[in-house]
């Protein structure tokens, strides 16, 4: 797949704080890219540097084969959709979308017929037909999101940057807008770079997922690779689906405060040795249950369970007081009940573990 955007050794500071630390990145054309990272990791700063709203201190940005880091935002050919939509409250849906065409600093569209046709086409594309004359205060949050996206797409950018575009929507609407955004992007055939702090949103939407940690790209790959093989304990922790047990390797075992665990599974290098097992890979058994030949496990005390609809998450404490989480999908079996402050055996196949050492 052809790359549309290249970043090489990009650095950005705010005072003494390094917000972006030598970012190197290539993004493919005609793709949906999710950029995932915790608060303060530099996600929005990276978008703003690409868009030209912030100047970088070092490095280069190339777009469609040409260097753009010295160009103003309006000359880069890249669209930007803000988290708060940034719509004009006194204008109708149609006039909000037409604004960028009529007022572009480069080649504004002055023919009313051309403006009308292009706005009509983009309104149909994003599913707003029939709402052209509505004020933006008279439409829903999801419709406002579509207006903000249409206002960007009508100018025919070659790439669109979306800064937490679903963050202002309620949970049900966020779910629906995920598929809407993917569908709109596919019909447009341009690259979307979507910033989010939600691991489920990033994994569900991105053809490629980038994980930003401590102001650098920690990992990039497809959603399956990121979810099943996080490259570091930091990435695994941010995915919010792994139990992480610090310790050390001793022979063929990983020694933790909760007990000795036989080695197995995928091993990766890390500054700090950590043993990781995903929440949904763990079984809950009676305390005296014997482990299987290929199993690892720990003894833990049950605290409480939390019903989430499709699954039940159960929480245990280990010998060192740390919390260990188990996720049981209700499609697999009927929910079980556990006695608070009672010891159980938590077991998993040793090959399901990730060992960072």
Image (tube, helix red, strand yellow):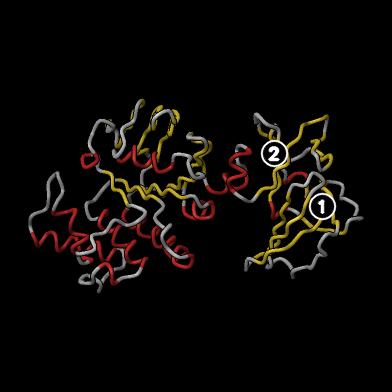
Residue 263, percent across and down?
A: 79, 37
> Does 229 sit left or right of 203 as displayed?
right
Quadrant of the drawing holding the N terminus: top left
Quadrant of the drawing holding the C terminus: top right
> Does 185 sit left or right of 285 as displayed?
left
> Does 23 sit left or right of 261 as displayed?
left
Q: Residue at x 84, y 50 (%)?
A: 299
Residue 348, percent across and down?
A: 78, 50
Q: Looking at the image, which residue sits at the far front?
A: 15
Residue 88, percent across and down?
A: 23, 60
- Viewer-proximal residue, 222 or 214? 214
Image quadrant assignment for residue 273: top right
Position of 218 relative to 84 (above/below): above
Q: CA distance from mark 2 to mark 1?
A: 24 Å
Q: Are marks 2 and 1 in contact (CB under 8 Å)?
A: no
Q: Residue at x 29, y 33 (%)?
A: 65
* Residue designated by label 2: 266
Of helix, strand and loop, which one carries label 1? strand
Residue 324, percent across and down?
A: 73, 51
* Residue designated by label 1: 300
Of helix, strand and loop, which one carries label 2? strand
Question: N-terminal of the two: label 2 or label 1?
Answer: 2
Q: Residue at x 50, y 44 (%)?
A: 37
Q: Looking at the image, which residue sits at the far top?
A: 58
**Could you say which disc has been placed on residue 69 in the image?**
none
């Amino acid at each position: 797949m052809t790359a549309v955007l290249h970043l090489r050794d990009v650095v950005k500071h705010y005072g003494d704080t390094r917000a972006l630390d030598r970012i190197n990145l290539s993004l493919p054309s005609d793709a949906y890219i999710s950029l995932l990272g915790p608060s303060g990791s530099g996600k929005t700063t990276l978008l703003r540097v690409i868009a030209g709203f912030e100047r970088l201190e070092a490095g280069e940005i190339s777009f469609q084969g040409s260097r753009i880091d010295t160009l103003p935002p309006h000359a880069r050919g890249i669209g930007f959709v803000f988290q708060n939509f940034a719509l004009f409250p006194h204008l109708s849906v149609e006039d909000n979308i037409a604004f960028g065409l009529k007022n572009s600093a480069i080649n504004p569209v002055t023919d009313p017929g051309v403006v009308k046709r292009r706005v009509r086409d983009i309104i149909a594309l994003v599913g707003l037909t029939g709402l052209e004359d509505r004020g933006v205060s008279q439409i829903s949050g999801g419709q406002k999101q579509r207006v903000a996206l249409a206002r960007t797409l009508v100018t025919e950018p070659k790439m669109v940057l979306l800064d937490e575009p679903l963050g202002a929507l309620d949970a049900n609407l966020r779910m629906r807008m995920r598929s809407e955004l993917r569908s709109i992007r596919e019909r447009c055939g341009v690259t979307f770079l979507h910033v989010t702090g939600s691991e489920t949103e990033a994994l569900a939407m991105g053809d490629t997922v980038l994980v930003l940690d401590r102001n650098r790209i920690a990992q990039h790959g497809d959603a399956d690779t990121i979810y099943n093989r996080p490259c570091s304990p930091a990435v695994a922790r941010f995915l919010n689906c792994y139990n992480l047990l610090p310790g050390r390797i001793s022979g063929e075992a990983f020694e933790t405060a909760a007990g000795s665990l036989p080695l197995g599974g995928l091993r990766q290098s890390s500054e700090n040795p950590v043993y990781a097992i995903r929440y949904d890979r763990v079984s809950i058994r009676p305390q005296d249950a014997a482990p299987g030949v290929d199993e690892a496990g720990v003894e833990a005390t049950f605290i409480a369970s939390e019903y989430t609809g499709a699954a039940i998450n159960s929480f245990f404490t280990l010998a060192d007081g740390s919390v260990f989480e188990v996720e049981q999908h209700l499609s697999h079996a009927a929910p079980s009940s556990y006695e608070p402050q009672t010891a159980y055996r938590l077991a998993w196949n040793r090959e399901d573990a990730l060992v960072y050492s």
